[in-house]
Amino acid sequence: MKNIAVIGAGTMGNGIAHTFAQNGFKVNLIDVSEVSLKKGIETITKNLDRMVAKETISEVQKKNTLKNISTFIKLDDGIKHADLVVEAATENSDLKLKIFKQLDDVCVKNTILASNTSSISITQIASATKRPERVIGMHFMNPVPIMPLVEIIRGYNTSDEVTKTIMELSKTLGKTPVEVNDYPGFVANRILMPMINESIETLYNGVAGVAEIDAVMKLGMAHPMGPLQLADFIGLDVCLSILNVMYTGFKNPKYAPCPLLVNMVTAGKLGIKSGEGFYDYSESRKAEKMANQFIK
């Protein structure tokens, strides 16, 4: 497996492309927008520059990583020779189903189709294809080049062979793959999102302020980042989307999004990406420092 296609040049997509390219894979990074592709490559370059400055990688490794990445606007051109496609588009089930149908139509029969979804059913995504046994979830953590975990999600029909292949591939990236079954939120977000939602409820109910809630969790529970700060980092719209998937999937009120979260997303306060969430990121330097505090 040498040729990787990554769909989506946003935060997760460019991080996934960076990780594969740094480990010697040829990567086609695909997005519908030239602007998004340019921004994605700029982000990868900045992150590589940080690694060079910290002597994590050499200048030669940085150049080779960038040489391994090609960009495409047309999906069909970017995926036709891929051994593995990793979809990292917006967390929207209709969009993912549309993408996977197109992937199934264009990719050769042996291509493995993976989704970086953080909550949407792999079985549902696979239903858009005629190869459900070759559809799997690869849920990377943000920031992808740094975080060691990859949740490997088996759909109902995902084959043992494909699961083993993706588990081993993840190890070649220096990651630790953990196999989980296909239920809403999987493991990471089934546990994380209710904690974030409850933290927002705590703020909503006036129990404590933003800084105080985060301080309790950082100083008392040894979390490296408070839950409200983490929500800003993930994106409040993403948090809301994941909670809605779990609420719909389990039909359990404990997953119902807090009204404050709903209102903030409606108002466009999405966290770091919009410049304001539970914290103010209006100064570009402040936003960059917050977003990259874990880049080592």
Image: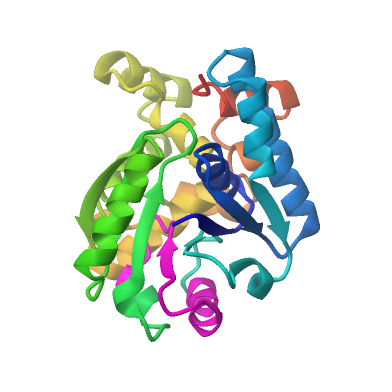
Residue depicted at x 36% and y 34%? 148
Q: Which of 234 and 276 is in front in this view?
A: 234
| Side of 272 where 284 appears, left or right | right
Q: Which of 253 and 92 is in front in this view?
A: 92
Q: Nearer the viewer, residue 40 or 245?
A: 40
Identify the image quadrant of residue 118: bottom left
> Is 107 contained in the magenta span?
yes
Q: Quadrant of the N terminus?
A: bottom left
Residue 32 lies, in percent from the top left, at: 71, 65
Q: What stretch is highlighted in magenta?
A: 94-123
| Side of 104 where 51 appears, left or right | right
Compared with 73, 188 (above or below) is above
Residue 262 lies, in percent from the top left, at: 50, 54
Residue 279 shows up from this direction: yes
- What number of labels is visible? 0
Residue 203 lies, in percent from the top left, at: 41, 34
Residue 251 shows up from this direction: no
Residue depicted at x 51% and y 19%? 296
Residue depicted at x 57% and y 41%? 18
Identify the image quadrant of residue 153: bottom left
Residue 103 lies, in percent from the top left, at: 52, 76
Compared with 121, 23 (above or below) is above
Judging from the image, the colouring scheme is rainbow
> Is 152 contained in the magenta span?
no
Q: Which of 294 and 168 is in front in this view?
A: 168
